[in-house]
Amino acid sequence: MEVSEDVLLKAVDLALGMGSSYAEARFQVDSVRFIHVRNGALQSIGNYSYGGVSVRVLVDGMWGFAATSDTSWDSIKDAVSRAVTYARAVARIRRRKIRLGHERLARVSYSVNEGVKVEDLSDDYLVKYLTGLDSRIKVEPRVRVRNLFLNVKITDKVLITSDGAYVRSRVPRIYLFGSLIAYDPQKGSAQRNVEFGGSGGFEILGNVEQELDREVSAIRDVLDKAKPLPHDDVMDVVFSPELAGILVHESVGHPSELDRIMGREGAEAGESYMRVDYLGSYKLGSDLVTIIDDPTIPNSYGYYLVDEEGVPARPRYLIRNGYVNEFLMNREYASYIGLTSNAAARASEFDKEPIPRMANTYLAPGDWKPEEIVRETRKGLFIASYTEWNIDDRRWFGRYGGFEAYYIENGDLKYMIRDPFIEVDTKTLWSNVDAMANDLRFFPGTCGKGNPEQGVPVFLGGVTFRVSGVRVLKSPT
């Protein structure tokens, strides 16, 4: 599937001729290859591609959006007509008119380098790779369910806008997901999901074997050594980079999306505790807390250099030294508060509209070593990995379940804790941070948002850090 740039330009010109004050045409094709191995046996394997052209227009102060998988000119022309018609219909009833700021727009072509192209690897090689990983896992015979999913997606895009943006990009992403379920008749069950990936070639999975070995060892220890807390307690909690990633994503990343703050997502993906007047004035965390969302990190799962509106990407400092510093904004929502877009407009597929999204969100490093934080903790809990999380619609109150966790006493990891839960509100979580390590790590994930829902690739990351005065609950079973 291919569409020439001349056809996209023609679509933009047609939209302007039909009365649009702004128009964009985006061609996107996603080529996917997948393999699923369960307990060492191949379950599914295949490949497919999907794509087409989307058109978005601004008419009488309102958006219109339409897409087609038929790349003939007649079908694209029809999509332009539909987008203009939709915009005019809604403009008659919408009071707040959309304006776009005057951002610096990109004219660029870029691609991600692949050291080892997955398309050059045979199906037999990849199946053998997954069954080899399965063999490493089943050295612990109590891991009775072992699901491994390998997904490779290559995304090719061309974007042209009426105000001068031109972007051509090619980003290959590789993602490995494992679901491991262990059972012991005397010790009960333990379940762990693991994720690996990034943008680039097969080399992205270079350390998977070692990480899986560690996960299997942790599952074994949870079954054999972990014991529940004797009672609920309030204590210091040391969180690993993995926990930092999910905490940052859920309690700061989502509520920093400006469309959510201004109410668009209220009936879809939830609301936000943030307010527009928090910008630059509200202190959410301690001075140690800086939280960044950066699409430009090389080989990251959420990598891009230009967003879906043609705005060049850069690091976004959502929280700087504890203060709310920046929201995630596209051109529309930035204009409502007198700012310019910071390139947060993303769309998952060709037929989805771009909306404000995260990319690679992480807790910035401090100057402690992780072992120093544990050594300087008199009584507390160290949570190395998690099993589940819950957070309310405003992203204010969260509950997180630990998987690999240890009780700290006088600076030592004394014993493993079985299934601890923490309950904490966002303000307490970030205000009570008193130590920040320098061991930055990232973990891939898929972030959901929108109606229809869009799942986009992201990194969740951070460092080991300590929070004082956290409510810790003993295992519910």
Image (cartoon, grey):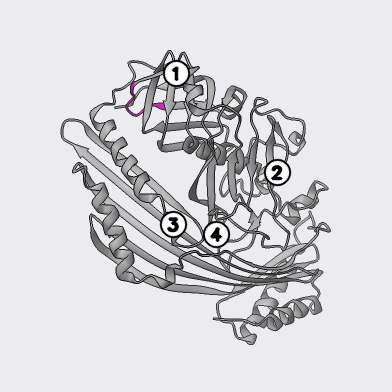
The earlier-in-sequence mark between 3 and 4 is 3
In the image, what residue occupies the spot 23% across and 57% down? 40
The residue carrying mark 2 is: 327
Q: Quadrant of residue 365?
A: top right
- Alpha carbon of mark 4 to alpha carbon of mark 2: how far? 23 Å
Secondary structure at numbered mark 3: strand
Q: Which residues make up the magenta segment? A: 415-421
Residue 292 visible in the picture? yes
**Residue 115 magenta-highlighted:** no
Residue 452's tag is: 4
The residue carrying mark 1 is: 380
The earlier-in-sequence mark between 2 and 3 is 3
The residue carrying mark 3 is: 175
Crowding around mark 4 (Cα neighbors within 10 Å: few <14, some 14 to 19, many 20+) is few
Amino acid type at image mark 3: Tyr
Amino acid type at image mark 4: Pro
**Apparent side of residue 170 relative to residue 133 in the rendered image (left or right):** right
Q: Nearer the viewer, mark 4 or mark 2?
A: 2
User: Residue 410 at what x, y percent from top left?
Assistant: 43, 13
Secondary structure at numbered mark 4: loop
- Alpha carbon of mark 1 to alpha carbon of mark 4: how far? 43 Å
In the image, what residue occupies the spot 45% across and 32% down? 400
**Apparent side of residue 450 relative to residue 238 in the rendered image (left or right):** right
The earlier-in-sequence mark between 3 and 1 is 3
Residue in front for this viewpoint, 82 or 218? 218
